Image (tube, helix red, strand yellow):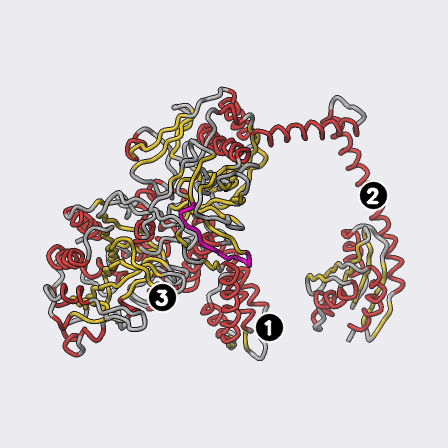
Amino acid sequence: MTAKEIRQAFLSFFESKQHHVVPSAPIVVKNDPTLMFTNAGMNQFKDLFLGEAAIKYSRVADTQRCLRVSGKHNDLEEVGIDTYHHTMFEMLGNWSFGDYFKKEAIAWSWELLTEVYKIPKEKLYVTYFEGDEKEGLAKDQEAFDLWKQYVDESHILPGNKKDNFWEMGDTGPCGPCSEIHVDCRTDEEKALVDGASLVNADHPQVIEIWNNVFMQFNRLKDGSLQSLPAKHVDTGMGFERLVRVLQDKTSNYDTDVFQPLIQFIADKAGIKYGADEKTDIAMRVMADHIRAISFVIADGQLPSNNKAGYVIRRILRRAVRYAYTFLNFKEPFLNQLVPLLADQFKGVFDELVSQQDFVQKVVLEEEVSFLRTLSTGIQRFEKYQAVNNSVEGNFAFELSDTFGFPIDLTELMAREKGWTVDLVAYEQALKKQKDDSRAATAIDTSDWVIVNADDQSEFVGYDDLEIETEILKYRKVKAKGKEQYQIVLRQTPFYAESGGQVGDTGRLEDHSRQFWIDITDTKKENGLTVHFADILPDNLEGKFWAVVDEDKRVLTEDNHSATHLLHAALKQVLGQHVNQKGSLVNADYLRFDFSHFAKVTDEELAQIEVIVNQKIRQNIKLKEQRNVPYQDAIESGVTALFGEKYGDFVRMITFDDHFSKELCGGTHVKATGQIGSFKIVSESAVAAGVRRIEAITADKAEQFFLDQRKELGQLKTLLNGSKDLPAAVQALLDENAKLKKEIEKSTLERVNTLKHEIVHHVRGIHGINLIAKHIDIQSAEAVKNLAFSLKDMVDNLFLVFTTEIDGKPGITVMLSDHLVKKGLNASNIVRELGKEIQGGGGGQPFYATAGGKNPAGLKAVLEKAESFIP
């Protein structure tokens, strides 16, 4: 069976068992502060396990794209080294939300593996939870008894809490689990060692492929276990491992999931796969990493220097490093794998197919940038002076952190020079960085305290900005030393931050409306609307008035609706390739990121502004359609955003059926006239192939034009009421340029005079000609020219100039080539001299400069200069 057939067989099997097949959620997580990426199939269903969302389908099946490169579930360093770990992988899953439980899950998993996939029964081992006395958890006797119906007892193995009690994290849904392992060894190997002894022993050929999790507890903050409102089944089967088993391979990388990529890499590198372990690892790393990189970018997360963007940049750079070091790819190559990958997933994950060109260009730009950085790092290493033939740990860490060098590359370059690397100090620096990072992002979250029991919280903010409601639950959170409370209301008019729109603020007033607390922010967590407050009301159980800050909401809506108009205008002016890649909408301004590979010209920006303002003046009424079937919306030509998780029913926002029609959960103006006016204030690059427009609307736009008018009036006054401002300014620029030339001419004459005066004040010391002098020239370039002129005139020159230009002290050091060859270094000398003026600097061995804060130290600089002469 091919990989595609294997995937489809899984989904079809569970469809026949009355499961609803749902699409994969985006790999980038947007509404869960505990996760950056989807790292398990259950992530998109977490709110269902916790009873915080309504269950649409009690039985579900899917294949979920997952990424495990950070946090508790971190496989990155094993990827490519072993045969079965990956950054991005597919998790085939079947789910029961309060429907069937252990009996059906176990029966169906056995049926699928042995009757559909026809894996020989004797190759399979199953495990069950043996219990844990400290937790007060009994042995999972039910699972054991159920497995005895299908499996010989010698193939049913007990597992401890580590292996057979699944937990999502330190808190959250959890429960006992039953794993299925496959023994892929040869008959000869099996005769020597019993497979049961190798289960969960990290044997590369005895591997887990499926885990049936019986979700029945919620782990609380204090470590205790609380029963969930209903029992659920959460299963996950590693697709890549399953394909390996069914295609009878000894490595995931030998299957048709990876081999097309690997053979393409091998062909382009001119190196046969299987010839050498080092080059094999490099090819596996590249084939694996391009999958993670491509899908994360397609889901809307661009490489950057923070959070999720940094993680994907790190993965990309790891792939490029392996290609550079072991496959001799000195030019960008990784991007060439994107079309091959997109074709491989056609009909499965079509978001990559539709964005192939964009993803490939982003990867290319990242490769170009990193190869430049890598080259700089190599130059840095070549200039490094080892201490006792050892590379200092801090320097090795700097190469890794700043230039992307893996420690093994640093060790390789060190060995070529006969050096070693202080790995202990390197590990200490690495640990310190990780500890600091964890401390900076640590959030201490208490358990929820229930005030009024209810399964659901309802958002009513599309229609109301003020309602009467109750508090369902609250909890305390502490981050960066600040304590806050998170509150969940039965009904809420507060919009939770989502889709680029900031969360509402406002007040929670008691029923008498005499006392209130401020709501400082509103966010989503697993579909739950969470309100932030610095304090709690005195009486939590009463009725409250939830009141949104209307002024802020209205201004935010102006900017949000303007982004829809802007998006449509961009497509009209620049082309249909434009797609939203991010946005920020608040009461002050809007920021809109979009795919486009060239700077937007002033003419194009003007045209875009005109179109948006025309639509505003037309006062187009909002057409809002709620609960539209997703497929009907797509067929109507609506714009959907890549990387967003849409349900079966969606909300459509339309301003003119032939202009702007988007899927959107945010709040909007009732008619475009409310926006008032629209003004673009900046256009810039964000990343490869992504541009950013920032703009203002409503009162901010009005104030912008008033400020512009005021500045124009001031400028006219300064130019004596000139009616032709451009001509008056040009005349001033011409006059300024003329005066500059005259000053340059005067300075040049001054330099020519000075050099002949100075050359007569040379002091000879041990065969070296010293010039140490304060120069009264108000041009750094002129001082440089003077120094170079004297170098040509004086042999064995050791020159130190001090200057004070615009009140700032400066030092210039110039050495003849002969003195440099003898070991003197102008850069080192100027750094030492710079201490006298409370500054620093650097440069080349023969010429260097420094600046500082203390002009009073210039005299000491000249006195100290002679001490550097050997």
Where residue 301 appears, x then y in whole percent? Answer: 43, 48
Instruction: Give the residue type that dot 3 points to.
Output: Glu
Query: Real-space Cα distance between discs 2 and 3?
Result: 65 Å
In-image side of 520 versus 754 (left or right): left
Instruction: Reply above or below: 732 against 130.
Output: above
In-image side of 246 versus 504 (left or right): left
Instruction: Reply above or below: 347 against 245.
Output: above
Instruction: Give the residue type that dot 1 points to.
Output: Gln
Q: Residues within 10 Å of mark 1 (few under 14, many from 20)?
A: few
Q: Nearer the viewer, residue 552 or 668?
A: 552
Q: Residues within 10 Å of mark 3 (few under 14, many from 20)?
A: some
Foreground disc of the pair 3, 1: 3
Could you tell me which residue is drawn at 60 percent across and 30 percent down? 699
Q: Main secondary structure of the magenta part?
A: strand
Res. 209 in view: yes
* Residue 547 magenta-highlighted: no
Ranked by sequence position, the earlier of labels 2 and 3 is 3
Q: Residues in magenta?
A: 471-482
Could you tell me which residue is drawn at 87 percent across and 60 percent down? 758
Where residue 401 appears, x then y in whole percent? Answer: 52, 63
In-image side of 120 versus 201 (left or right): left
- The quadrant of the rendering that contains the C terminus is bottom right
Q: Which residue is mark 3?
A: 78
* Residue 480 magenta-highlighted: yes
Q: Which residue is mark 1?
A: 385
Q: Which residue is mark 2?
A: 743
